Image: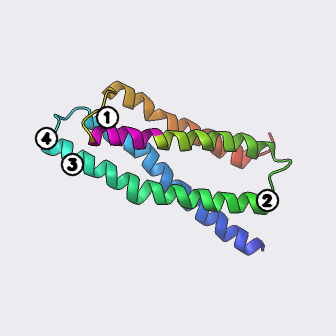
Amino acid sequence: MFESYLFIKAFHIVSIISWMAGLLYLPRIFVYHTKTKKNSEADNLFKIMEKKLLRFIMLPAFLSSLVTGLILIYIVGFKGNTWLHIKLLFVICLIYTHHLMAKYAKNFANNKNQKSEKYFRIFNEIPAIIMIIIVFLAIVKNF
């Protein structure tokens, strides 16, 4: 049981790293995308990059993070782990951020982006801040 727990935990960490890479990189692509003219070669390239990053990296990484996370919660237990309850609130924030990024990518794909370069520069910091909080909660646990 303990050995399988460690393998699941390792896979969970790899999945999280992959998902976070997308959550940190996609808003940076949006920053550069805001500077392009609609239907230009660069605009079309950014649309492809955004779609592929979301579909082939972020979504599978998110799903495997979710599945392995739920398995770990089942193994460790949910009751009495206040740190885990707080961590899950921030995980929900990351999921919502992922959802917003998918919405923004769809807006770019349909030439309907209304957000500025400055907005995406600020938005880019949100996943990093949430990630730092989650890591501290997971490591320190019962503070």
Give the residues in magenta.
Answer: 100-109
Q: Earlier in the sequence, mark 3 or mark 2?
A: 3
Q: Earlier in the sequence, mark 1 or mark 4?
A: 1
Q: Earlier in the sequence, mark 3 or mark 1?
A: 1
Q: Label 3 is placed on what type of residue?
A: Leu
Magenta stretch containing residue 136, yes or no? no
Q: Earlier in the sequence, mark 4 or mark 2?
A: 4
Q: Earlier in the sequence, mark 4 or mark 3?
A: 4
Front label number (1 vs 4) = 4
Residue 52's x, y, as percent? Answer: 33, 55
Of the numbered discs in the image, which one, if any, rests on residue 99? none
Task: Kindly indicate whether the residue at mark 1 contacts the one at mark 3 (C-beta within 8 angstroms).
Answer: no
Q: Which residue is mark 2?
A: 76
Q: Position of 69 compared to 142: left or right? A: left
- What residue is drawn where x is 32% and y is 37%? 107
Q: Label 2 is placed on what type of residue?
A: Val
Q: Secondary structure at mark 3?
A: helix
Q: Earlier in the sequence, mark 1 or mark 2?
A: 1
Q: Residues within 10 Å of mark 3 (few under 14, many from 20)?
A: few
Q: Which residue is mark 1?
A: 31
What is the CA distance from the residue labelled 1 to the residue labelled 4? 16 Å
Task: Kindly indicate whether the residue at mark 2 contacts the one at mark 3 (C-beta within 8 angstroms).
Answer: no
- What residue is drawn where x is 54% and y is 58%? 63
Q: Secondary structure at mark 2?
A: helix
What is the CA distance from the residue labelled 1 to the residue labelled 2? 40 Å
Front label number (3 vs 1) = 3
